[in-house]
Image: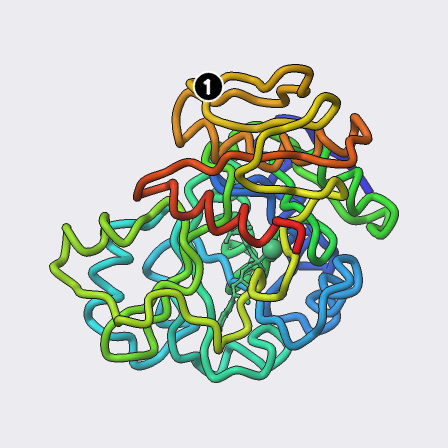
Amino acid sequence: MKIISNPTQVEIKRAAQALKDGHLVAFPTETVYGLGADATNERAVSRIYSVKARPTDHPLIVHISSINQLTKWAIDIPEYAIKLARKFWPGPITFIVKRSDLAKDFVTGGQDSVGLRVPSHRVAVSLLTEFEKLGGAGIAAPSANRFGAVSATTAKAVCEDLGDYLLAQDIVLDERGCTIGVESTILDCTTLTPRILRPGAVTTGNIESLFSITFDSSGLLNEKKVSGNSENHYSPKARVILNRLANPGEGFLALSNIPTPEGAIRLSAPDTLEQYARDLYNTFRLADEKKLQILVVIPPDGQGLAVAIRNRLSKAEDK
Ligand code: TXA
Ligand code: MG
């Protein structure tokens, strides 16, 4: 694979052409890195599944350059979803909507719905724009990690995880800027009122306060195939243990106001929830680099981004 650091417009154009030719391009978004393929090319999309070792019934998010592309991929879009998309796109929220004929089974995992997102990272936006100029309709991209492992927030992490499985013509676009650090909020818009399937940086509070939408009492739903609903997702190799005192030699992650237990190895001391989310997956990776057996984590209290952080921690927790 080719790694291109701080890609210029010309290099991004070339990457868009590579996508059009059926190759894979990993690219940064404001949440995590995506492993992209032309969402209408079955062979290219099938490579995503093999590179990630991901079961083929797990649907992919289709990334588009702007809200104007929404009706290409979706039909019967509820009014509230359009309002929300206008407010939060480009940004860290994915809408699950009824699919159009363009969204084939190989992208939706056979579901009648499709996940759509307009990311805001500079590289993602230009890649999508250039790809659409070449006649592309959207880029299917899951997080750029092996199935069940920790999402990648740096190009280095993408290469460590997937480098062995990518081919010579595939490209990794390397630029900083996964500033959120956890995956997008997923909102199911196939029902009368929206439901959060995966919490993220766009919070229920954001949505409710802005649009006086009330959430289904079910809140977090488990019936759909949402990556992360299987046990032990987002896990490092180290055993993640929540809410206990760390022993000497064990890794430790907590907000900076919580002191490091005697002898424990402090891997991160975020001052804010934003920093906690941004560094979370890197901290997991650091635990593995240090070959730690155990990582003790004190999850943050409260609402907002804390909900997404606790969600990922509970998936990563050793059960
Ligand atoms: O922030 C993100 O969302 C990142 C960046 C790259 O955009 N992407 C990401 O993709 O996290 P992934 O595939 O790792 O997780 C998205 C999850 C999928 O696991 C899938 O189950 C769910 O979104 N999803 C996609 N389409 C769906 C659908 N039609 N119905 C229900 N869930 C869906
Ligand atoms: Mg993922």
The reply to whether residue 166 is in sight is yes
Q: Residue at x 33, y 50 (%)?
A: 89
Q: Residue furthest left?
A: 212
Q: Position of residue 306 (x, y in %)?
A: 38, 41
Residue 142 vertical placement versus 30 (above, below): below
Image position of 127 (left or right of 202) = right
Q: Position of residue 221 (x, y in %)?
A: 42, 70
**Quadrant of res 303:** top left
Q: Residue at x 20, y 67 (%)?
A: 80
56, 219: nearer the viewer: 219
Image position of 130 (left or right of 44) = left
96, 285: nearer the viewer: 285
SS at mark 1 in the image:
loop
The reply to whether residue 13 is in sight is no
**Quadrant of res 19:** bottom right
Q: Residue at x 44, y 59 (%)?
A: 198
Residue 23 vertical placement versus 114 (above, below): above
Image position of 250 (left or right of 306) = right
Residue under numbered circle 1: 256
